[in-house]
Amino acid sequence: MMPDLELMGDQLGLAGKTILVVGGGAGIGERTALRLAAAGCNICVVDVAEDRAAAVAEQLLKLGVKAASVLGDVTDPETVGGVVDEAWEAIGPLDGCVTIVGMSHQAPLLDMPLDMWTLDFNLNVRHVFLLFQAVAKRMVEAGRPGALACVTSVSGRQAAPNHAAYGAAKAGLAQLVKSMAIEWAPYDIRVNAVGPGTIITPRLPDTPQRIEEVRQSGIPMRRRGTADEIAKCLLFMMSDLASYVTGHNLMADGGWMAANLKNRPGWRGP
Ligand SMILES: NC(=O)c1ccc[n+]([C@@H]2O[C@H](COP(=O)([O-])OP(=O)(O)OC[C@H]3O[C@@H](n4cnc5c(N)ncnc54)[C@H](O)[C@@H]3O)[C@@H](O)[C@H]2O)c1
């Protein structure tokens, strides 16, 4: 076991569980796949980047679990069901699914083109509807309980200039999670979200400017979070520690939502 991945293995109740990790090829998704595998889960990594998904699956195999990778675009309604079937086939009947897919495209509202609005809704909320519906249907048909988790954002709670589509989509996602939670609770399927603040990832690495912005912002913890800190929250949501938690949107933001910030990091003005 890699020592930095060890976390109460037996109390998590995850050993032998089969989990689909979508967007698992990089950043928060990669770290989530590693955390789940370290807790004993068999993992199928789905990503649009086939080489990265395969490289993560290789790392997971070294942790002694079953692992596979599948190429798939979960925003495409034509293919999402097939991706879930392929994963089910590759590692066995699913006990859970985590998707971390999401991204923001920025423009002032007065100039925002419709295709940018549509892209952010497809990436950040519609894909979760398509994916979790496909997974939950198969769980219900198979009579299997399950846990599902996705990633929202502080931007779904507080507005920022140029983030209108992303913020509205993430706010919608938090509400979708509640609806899924209440409709699927009778089938013993829990649905939760984790809402990051500003997180260091390969796409958004720490730079002197970002470090300084966060110091100046008033975020109480005065630093950006790590991909692993979000992965640990997702691990919690998938585990038995969260057995009575559903419909929740856990903010992992260094205290951002608790504070009245002086300046939002990355604030560029409208
Ligand atoms: N990084 C931050 O500061 C931050 C802050 C708040 C919220 N978030 C949210 O966290 C989540 C992950 O962010 P990240 O920065 O780690 O992302 P990332 O871009 O680093 O990783 C996303 C992964 O998903 C894959 N992917 C993208 N589109 C896909 C698709 N259609 N189908 C399958 N795979 C796809 C990518 O290839 C990549 O491997 C997102 O939902 C984002 O909105 C991030």
Image: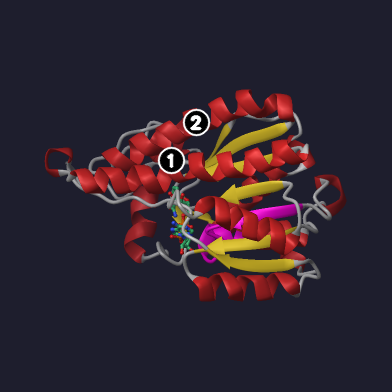
- Give me the disc on residue 176: 2
Residue 13 at x, y percent in the picture: 83, 46
Q: Residue at x 23, y 40 (%)?
A: 161
Q: Is residue 178 visible?
A: yes
- The magenta-colored residue range is 18-31
Q: Which amino acid type is shown beneath numbered disc 1?
A: Val
Q: Which amino acid type is shown beneath numbered disc 2?
A: Leu
Element under label 1?
A: helix
Residue 261 at x, y percent in the picture: 36, 36
Pointers 2 and 1 in contact (C-beta within 8 Å): yes
**Image quarter hosting the N terminus:** bottom right
Q: Is residue 28 magenta?
A: yes
**On the rendered structure, is 230 left or right of 188?**
left
Q: Is residue 33 visible?
A: no
Q: Residue at x 45, y 67 (%)?
A: 202
Q: Residue at x 32, y 61 (%)?
A: 209
Graded by Cα atoms within 10 Å as few (under 14), some (14 to 19) or many (20 or more), the crowding at tag 1 reads many
**On the rendered structure, is 67 left or right of 196?**
right
Residue 189 at x, y percent in the picture: 70, 34
Element under label 2?
A: helix
In depth, the one of 91 and 77 nearer the eye is: 77
Compare marks 2 and 1 and give the one earlier in the sequence: 1
Q: CA distance from mark 2 to mark 1?
A: 8 Å
In depth, the one of 263 and 241 nearer the eye is: 241
**On the rendered structure, is 110 left or right of 128?**
left
In depth, the one of 75 and 6 nearer the eye is: 75
- Give me the disc on residue 125: 1
